[in-house]
Image (tube, rainbow, N blue to C red):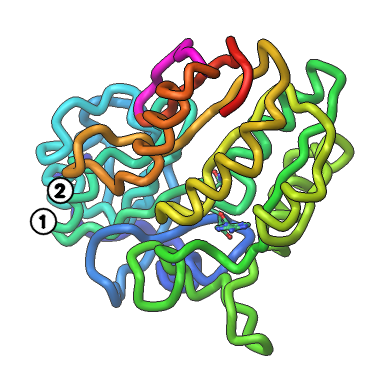
Amino acid sequence: MAETTAPPPTPAVPLAALLAQGELGLRQIAGPERSDAVVHWVHTSEMADPYPYLLGGELLLSAGVLLEDPDTYVARSVAAGAAALGFGVTPVYDTVPAGLVEACDRHGLPLLEVGTYCGRSTILLADAARAAGVTAVTVDHHRGSEEQQEGWEYHDPSLVDPEAGRMDTLPSFRRTLHRAGLEDHVVAVVGRSPQIARLWQTPLGLVFIDGGHTDEHANGDYEGWAPRVADGGLLVIHDVFPDPADGGQAPYRVHRRALASGAFTEVSVTDSLRVLRRTGPGI
Ligand SMILES: C[S@@+](CC[C@H](N)C(=O)[O-])C[C@H]1O[C@@H](n2cnc3c(N)ncnc32)[C@H](O)[C@@H]1O
């Protein structure tokens, strides 16, 4: 019960050691930067309030199924002695809810995103490709976007190649595909998006744009790949935030551009994900 504050008689693992294991796909996104938290055990719970069942020292895993009030949830997890919170992105949330990030910062609880960006969307697309009997192609230079570089919000030092001194997400991406058993359904093309787009001729049934989030890169992706979307095919754009308070505006501008072109019609909106269908020529 939560009133018990003594940690369980299991060997403690420093949270930092878990974070350093790249293959676990954990990334700390809130809470004390240099946490000395130690994890005694890992528990999953989708209860709205797991407080009565926590003994202390847990890495508590949740996908936020019943998450309603992040502040109360985090405050009570801290009161029960939880060591850290691991939040699983997809299937319930596409990204970790901002309210949860703020609450963990406020209450000093390390918050880990579970499910790294090194292949997360690819495995969903590859799974769909497998079901449809087609192949998914991913394009990435694997050097990370602007916001993933050192000193930026989404930097993950475990993804830096020490020899090159640069980000290298390719090994982690390959592990993700391997673990998901989807290697046979994906072709990974390593390189710069506009350069590859110039070489690409095959019409595509679906294009998912989630690359660099500056205007230059987002427009480059659109101009390079949208022309290849087949008649009736889908153009999917991630991180579309009409309100600047929610995030960068470049993908939103590209989304508006696609609609204004008359070539695409919106078919669905899920959080920041917009799905458009080609209903006319051009871009
Ligand atoms: C937001 S992450 C993609 C996340 C991915 N969709 C997922 O869910 O795991 C953006 C990726 O775009 C790549 N990128 C950014 N600009 C690029 C460019 N010009 N050409 C190729 N890849 C690029 C980065 O290396 C980074 O891995």
Task: Answer left or right for 174 relative to 60.
Answer: right
Residue behind mark 1: 106
Task: Answer left or right for 176 relative to 97.
Answer: right
Residue 219 appears in the figure: yes
On screen, residue 23 above or below 20? above
Magenta stretch? Answer: 264-271
Please give the name of the residue rendered at 47% of the width and 24% of the height, measured from the top-left corner: 261
Amino acid at pointer 2: Ala
Q: Nearer the viewer, residue 24 or 206?
A: 206
Disc 1, SS: helix
Question: Does the stretch in magenta take in 266?
Answer: yes
Please give the name of the residue rendered at 61% of the width and 25% of the height, measured from the top-left corner: 282
Amino acid at pointer 1: Arg
Residue 164 rendering spot, x and y as whole percentages: 66, 86
Question: Could you tell me if the residues under marks 2 and 1 are in contact, i.e. CB atoms within 8 Å?
Answer: yes
Residue behind mark 2: 103
- Specify the quadrant of the image occupied by residue 174: bottom right
On screen, residue 162 above or below 230? below
> The C terminus is located in which quarter?
top right
Q: Which mark is residue 34?
A: none
CA neighbours of label 2 inside 10 A, class few (<14), some (14 to 19), many (20+): many
Question: Does the stretch in magenta take in 135?
Answer: no
Disc 2, SS: helix
Residue 74 rendering spot, x and y as whole percentages: 18, 44
